[in-house]
């Protein structure tokens, strides 16, 4: 007897994205795209392994050994890092948890998949710009050009707020308060709202941009009037980094993405002595552990902390004596 659509792989995939991810969990568009891409890759891999069309895949095909083979394929054949492998697993695991809620008859099958562990991965240090480098990139914008005012406001906004690019592109004129206290309402991951203060310079740049905007309009738009895209922001940033590199040669070796502006904001806040828990709320991190990674990123901050610790400890600055093993110690080790 054939199963109804609600019990089929297609039906459960649809309910996972529409009912669970978007409505129940309130996942961002970025998360939805990432999970979509991961499941698409998994289904294509599974169909190839089973030698049948994707349309013929069934719930019985989603087994732990198939998931493990897929993860190995992601690393060995596609050349993805362990971090990417873990992201693909997170998407599959979230989907399987949905299957478990909807189809308890296969609890054992799904439980074996949920037991698959993440692979230990070396976390790359966050790339960021020093304040003078960020200023150089923003100063590279010709504000008299056709879209110079928009680009200046956009890069100032990203650096000022540390907003994710998706958060910045979702800002509407009605989300801004450009009189004291100057601030913006951002909608982050899980549809969590937070308020970020704005510099007077950022507020002025946004005010000039808003002269031609309605309250419900998205703030950042392209030349044709359509909403600016993530790729569009990345393109603009690369362009201004190339221009700024003419005066700041160190930028020539840097790959500066919109997220680098977020990292740059976080590190600048740390350098200014702002408490990590405050920065966590400022950036909209779920955990202070995520924010703490920026401390490990900045070598100069480590040096300053070490020097302050040394002065506070009041230790003798003379060079320590070199340790030499005693004859008894050597004799003991040799007789083991």
Image (cartoon, rainbow, N blue to C red):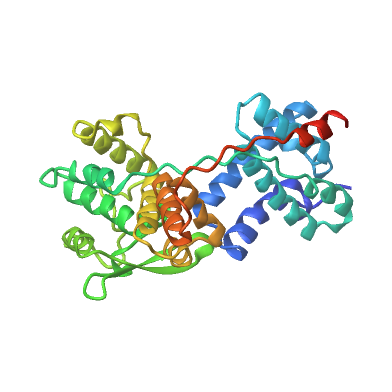
**Closer to us: 320 or 211:** 320
The residue at the point 73 percent across, 27 percent down is 48
Question: Is 60 on the left or on the right of 185, as rendered?
Answer: right
Q: Residue at x 65, y 47 (%)?
A: 91
**From what the image shows, is residue 24 above or below residue 112?**
below
Q: Nearer the viewer, residue 222 or 294?
A: 294
Residue 286's spot in the image, x, y percent? 55, 62
Q: Quadrant of the C terminus?
A: top right
Is residue 296 visible to the viewer in this orientation of the structure? yes
Quadrant in the rendering for residue 197? bottom left
Horizontally, is 75 left or right of 281 in the view?
right
**Residue 252, position in %: x, y?**
30, 29
Look at 21% across and 34% down and name the residue there: 243
Is residue 46 in sight in this rendering? no
Point out the residue furthest to the front here: 327
Q: Quick check: 155 left or right of 68?
A: left
* Residue 23 x, y percent position in the rendering: 59, 64
Count every numbered label the image shows and give the total: 0
Between residues 295 and 237, which one lies in front from this camera angle?
295
Residue extending furthest toward the bottom? 180
- 142 relative position to 189: left or right: left
Q: Position of residue 64 (x, y in %)?
A: 82, 41
What is the residue that sits farthest to the left in this orientation?
A: 144
Pick out the residue farthest to the top. 77
Vertical position of residue 131 compared to residue 214: above or below: above
């Amino acid at each position: 007897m054939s199963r109804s659509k609600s019990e089929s792989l297609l039906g459960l995939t649809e309910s996972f994205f529409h009912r669970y991810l978007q409505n129940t969990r309130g996942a961002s568009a970025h998360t939805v795209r990432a999970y979509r891409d991961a499941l698409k890759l998994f289904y294509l891999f599974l169909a190839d392994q089973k030698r049948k069309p994707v349309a013929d895949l069934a719930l019985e095909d989603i087994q732990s050994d198939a998931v493990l083979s897929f993860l190995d394929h992601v690393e060995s054949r596609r050349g993805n890092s362990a971090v990417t492998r873990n992201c693909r697993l997170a998407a599959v695991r979230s989907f399987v948890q949905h299957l478990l809620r909807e189809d308890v008859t296969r609890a054992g099958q799904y439980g074996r998949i949920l037991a698959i562990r993440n692979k230990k991965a070396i976390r790359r240090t966050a790339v960021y710009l020093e304040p003078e480098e960020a200023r150089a990139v923003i100063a590279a914008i010709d504000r008299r050009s056709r879209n110079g005012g928009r680009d200046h406001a956009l890069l100032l906004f990203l650096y000022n707020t540390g907003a994710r690019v998706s958060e910045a592109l979702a800002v509407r004129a009605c989300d801004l308060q450009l009189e004291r206290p100057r601030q913006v309402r951002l909608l982050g991951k899980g549809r969590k709202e937070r308020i970020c203060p704005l510099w007077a310079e950022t507020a002025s740049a946004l005010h000039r941009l808003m002269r031609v905007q309605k309250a419900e309009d998205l703030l950042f738009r392209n030349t044709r009037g359509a909403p600016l895209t993530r790729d569009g922001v990345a393109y603009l940033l690369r362009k201004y980094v190339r221009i700024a590199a003419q005066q700041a040669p160190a930028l020539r070796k840097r790959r500066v993405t919109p997220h680098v502006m977020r990292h740059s904001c976080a590190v600048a806040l740390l350098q200014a002595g702002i408490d990590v828990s405050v920065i966590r709320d400022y950036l909209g991190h779920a955990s202070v552990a995520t924010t703490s990674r920026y401390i490990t990123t900045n070598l100069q901050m480590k040096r300053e902390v070490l020097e302050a610790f040394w002065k506070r400890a009041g230790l003798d600055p003379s060079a320590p004596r070199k340790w030499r093993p005693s004859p008894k110690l050597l004799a003991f080790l040799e007789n083991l």
